[in-house]
Image (cartoon, rainbow, N blue to C red):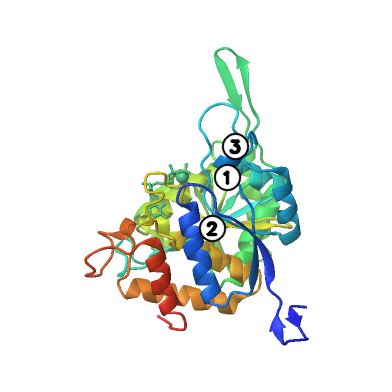
Amino acid sequence: SDIDGSIGTVTPVPITVAAGDGIGPEIMQATLKVLQAAGARIAPETIEIGEQLYLQGHTSGIAPQCWDSLRRTRVLLKGPITTPSGRGYKSLNVTIRKTLGLYANVRPCVSYSPFVATRHPKLDIVIVRENEEDLYAGIEHRQTDQVVQCLKLITRPGCERIIRYAFEYARANGRRKITCMTKDNIMKMTDGLFHQVFDEIATGYPDIQTEHMIIDIGAARVATRPEQFDVIVTTNLYGDILSDIVAEMTGSVGLAGSANIGEHVAMFEAIHGSAPDIAGKGIANPSGLLLAAVMMLVHIRQPDVAARIHNAWLCTLEDGVFTADLAGHASSRLSRPFGSMDFADAIIERLGRTP
Ligand code: ATP
Ligand code: MG
C-alpha cells in the first residue's frame, strides 16, 4: 500500500534520476524543482551516466552498479546523453532500451496554438514506436570488402506486444483511431508480419477505428494533414524518423517528452539531444523533460500531481512566457525569453491554475 498509516502521509515512490550531458543537468534541475513544488511523492536516487562514464572507460556510458538502482526502482527519469564520437563507444540509449527490454516508445506530439505558432494548429498525434527490433537489432556485418549487410529482424511476439500496447494505450487515453504504417508492399515478410498482426489484434478492439498506410504516403499525409491522425503504430526505424518530424511540426523539438515502456521498467526522457551548442548557458527549454516527468507521474499512479503540473505548464505558455528556442514562435510581447530556471519558477507560480 502507498499509505503510511502512522502519520497519514503517502510514502514517496523511489525513482532513479540521471541528469545526463550537455543541457541535461540544467533541464533536470528545473524539472525536479517543479516536481517538488507540485508535491510529487517521489524519492529520487541519482545515478551518473554518460560522458563522464565513457571517459572513465565504461564503453557503454554506465557503471555496473547503476543497473541495481534501476532494477530496484523500475523507473528512470533521464536527461540526454552525448555518445562520444569514434569507434568503440556504444550508444547508451540503445543499451538501456535493450538491457531493460523497453519495447514501446511513446511520443505524444501536440500543437499549442495560438501560444506556440505552428502551421498545424490541430495536430495531436501519439506515435507508438517499436523500440527493440527491426534494423536496430544490431545484426550488421561485412560480407566482403565491398559488401556490408544489416538484417531487419521482426518477430511475431515483438509485433504482438507493441501493437497490443498501442491498442491498450488508445483505449486508456480515450483515443479513437490507430493507423498502422509499414512498407509491406515491398518487405512482404517482415513488414507484412507487422501488418498482419495489426489486423489480427484489431479485431479484439471493435471500439477503435483502424487503418493501414504505406509509410511513405502515410508520412506525407502526416506532414500535410496531421489532424487526420490520432495514434500511429509503426516499426522502429519508421517510428524514429516520423516522430522527429511530427515533434518539429509542433514548433520546437524542445517541447516533446517520451515514455519508454518495458515489462518491468519504464524510462522517461525528452526527445531532443544534449544540445551542446547551448549547454551551460541556462537557456534550454525544460519542457520536453518536464512533460516526460508528467508521463512518469501518471505511470507511478500520481495522475493528480501530473495534471497539476501539466495545467500550470499550459498556463505558463498561455501567459506568453517562453524560452529562447520558442522566440519567433511565441505569441507574447515579452522583450526577452526566460532562462530555464526562471521558466520553472513561472510554472511553479501557476500551480493550481487550469488553462
Ligand atoms: P542527438 O544526436 O543527441 O539526438 P541532435 O543532433 O538530435 O542530438 P539536439 O541535441 O537535439 O541535436 O539539438 C538540436 C538543436 O535543437 C540544437 O540547436 C539545440 O540547441 C536545439 N535544442 C535541443 N533541445 C533543446 C532544448 N531543450 N531547448 C532549446 N533548444 C534545444
Ligand atoms: Mg536527435
Instruction: Give, as a three-letter code, the residue at label 3.
Output: Tyr
Coordinates of residue 147 in the picture (x, y in percent): 57, 17
Residue appearing at x 49%, y 74% in the figure: 309
Instruction: Give, as a three-letter code, the residue at label 2.
Output: Ser
Q: CA distance from mark 2 to mark 1?
A: 15 Å
Residue at numbered disc 3:
54
Q: Nearer the viewer, mark 2 or mark 1?
A: 2
Residue at numbered disc 2:
258
Quadrant hosting residue 222: bottom left
Q: Secondary structure at mark 2?
A: strand
Coordinates of residue 150 in the picture (x, y in percent): 60, 28
> Relative to the observer, which residue lies in front, 164 or 350?
350
Q: Secondary structure at mark 1?
A: helix
Residue at numbered disc 1:
236
Coordinates of residue 156 in the picture (x, y in percent): 72, 46
Q: Nearer the viewer, mark 3 or mark 1?
A: 3
